[in-house]
Image (cartoon, coloured by chain):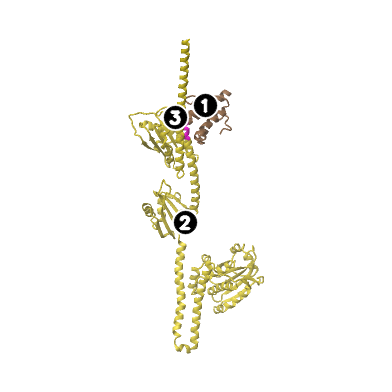
Chain colours: A yellow, B brown
Amino acid sequence: MENIFFTISVIFLIIISVVLFWRERSFRKRARNYEANMRRKMYELAVLKDLSKKIGSSFDVERIIDVVTGSLHQFIEHTSVSYMLLEKEGFSFKIYLEKSVDKNFIHEVRERMKTSLETLLVKEINDQEIEERVSGAIVIDEKPNKIGSFFNIPLVIDEKVVGLLTIADTKEGQYKEEDITILYKIVAQASQSVTKLEQLVKTEQLKLGAIVESLIDGVIMTDREYKVLMVNPAAKKYLGLEKTLDIDFFKLVNSFEDHFDIRSKLEESIAFDKIITEREVLINEKFFQIVVAPVKGESHIVEDQILGCVVVFHDITKEKESEKFKEDFNSLIVHELRGPLGTIKKIGEVMHGERIREDKTTYDEYIKIVFDSSSQMLELVDGLLDISRIESGRFALSSRVSEIKNIIEGRVIFFSTLAKDKEIELISKVSEDVPSEIKFDPLRIEQALSNLLSNSVKYTNPKGLIEVQAFLHKKGEKIVEEAERNGVVWFITERENEVFFNVPDCVVVGVTDSGEGISKENLEKMFIKFNKEEILMQNKSGKKSTGLGLAVVKGIIRAHGGIVGVDSREGEGSTFYFTINI
Amino acid sequence: MDEEEKEEYKRLMVEIISKQSIILGPEIAIMRARGVKNITITEKGEVENIEGNYKEVLQSLINQYVELSGEIVRATLGSIFQKYPTLDKEGLS
């Protein structure tokens, strides 16, 4: 009985011990699993946190791999971490050794990665294309090693394979699926973030590219090694490189010829981190202000690092012309004022004398000269004031219902004396359908017509004819046909039909003369202020002008909502016209 | 016919596992394949047996790899599928 009891107790104790042992073992296993899971989670969290910080400002794949692999040793055991990346030219293979291995181990890793990438990219990779870099533990050839376990993670950005990450170890069966999956998950998240960032950058680049492409200023960008990265259409045009394909640095240097030493300026800008401004460079008959400035990286990765250079051309030809013309104009104005002022001064001196007052004929003659000279100056000053008002938008009209026919007739009478002196016939032809009451500023329209008539009288030779014409235009009608119907003989041709097509119903006032006519190239410049052609033409023929008359006409008519125009046949005559809306 | 079709599916799956072994490494490629239901895989990555709907098994195998390394996997399968013109691949994604 005692034996039986003893045996049962022993069996019971054995069972209890076995149960306790299994429970203990199972508990330890659960604890180990729990610990392993915690380690994985901690690694995942730490890496993702680090990635979210770093990917926010960079999509440098190498940097991201460094973050993923930086704390890898805390999480899984490995002999090496390596990556093979697609570069602009070829591939880079970088392997970091956690433990010492021989050259064959490195070679084997490299070969496996190469085969994997070849399969992914569906292309062969030559060994010469791969640039290798080994870091970490030292390579010991006396200690032969083989790869026991390894796995690859393809690196994909924006649906394109950009490289491969490989973890390898000398021991077999080293990696569990859970460990590998976590790394895949982290790399996938990093790839997604980088893809998003890259897409954002691409969109911004496209926007920026479109802006630079459409700039009127020429823009050239180079990298630090003077490789030409971008030449916008304006720069190509200015340098005469529109038809040149693949613009390299040498083509660029040649296009500047001796006018601008672009090579030295780029070198200076990069070497001294300096913005260089060249105020006036003449290239292909145009003047440019050229700015050469270094381009710096703004992110923390390339902070203060000069990435290249940008060259900006600003076309200052018009400013230069305008500047020169203003200088010419100023000297002209000074000359124009100096002449009559000198005359007035001299006459003033002479008129101090007693004798001149007694000689009534000479006295009257001198008074007339003083009057003419001061009128001439006043005309010039008035013209300048009008132009100034037109340009500043202070040109006020006093419009009221007026009769254009009366104004035309009044001006014809006013200029007839002058015309008669030159043996020019001055007539007017106003069509019957021209309304007698239109709202406009009579004084200003009179001034506009006076300016046109004054020019015509100057340019028409003796025995010539000047005709002031007025007729009605209906919107959509052809102006040439309308003129014909009204018996108007002028120099306006059919090309003006297009100009008039959308012009509302209006009265067209034309001044046609049988003068010298105007060349085609000068026609377009006729209504420009300080018109050089107008000044030169008038001064050449001894007819003084400020070049402001036609610009004033244009300002007056525009203020009325009308249009101005001119056409001519050289050697036969010209027609200047303006419209007044009804 | 069914046996012939089964063998062809097996060959196709072996090729997929083999290609993924080159790309991802044999250990993880085989581990993932072994996670698919109704398929028996040897340690060397050979398909011993498949059961049930073969097309569904094939889809599960593809999904295992896509889940791991993303859509890039599908691009690598095109050339393998071309070798099996008689197999019904309609609806596979």
Q: Position of residue B78 (x, y in %)?
A: 52, 33
Q: Secondary structure at mark 1?
A: helix
Q: Amino acid at mark 3?
A: Tyr
Q: Position of residue A296 (x, y in %)?
A: 41, 50
Q: Position of residue A316 (x, y in %)?
A: 45, 61
Mark 3 and mark 2 lie on one chain; the one further toward the N terminus is 3
Which stretch appears magenta?
A176-184
Report the magenta stretch's main SS. Answer: helix
The answer to which image quadrant residue A138 occupies is: top left
Front-most of residues B16 and A138? A138
Q: Is residue A402 magenta?
A: no
Front-most of residues A446 and A513? A446
- Residue closest to the far right: A433
- Name the mark nearer the viewer: 1 or 3: 3
Name the residue rendered at 57%, 32% in the picture: B92
- Residue closest to the far front: A2
* Residue bearing mark 1: B11
* Residue bearing mark 3: A175
* Residue bearing mark 2: A217
Question: Which chain is home to disc 1?
Answer: B
The answer to which image quadrant residue A578 occupies is: bottom right
Front-most of residues B3 and A239? B3
Q: In which quadrant is the C terminus of chain A drawn? A: bottom right
Q: Position of residue A289 (x, y in %)?
A: 43, 59
The answer to which image quadrant residue A175 occupies is: top left
- Are the numbered discs 1 and 2 placed on the same chain, yes or no? no
The span from disc 1 to disc 3 (Cα, nearest Å) is 27 Å
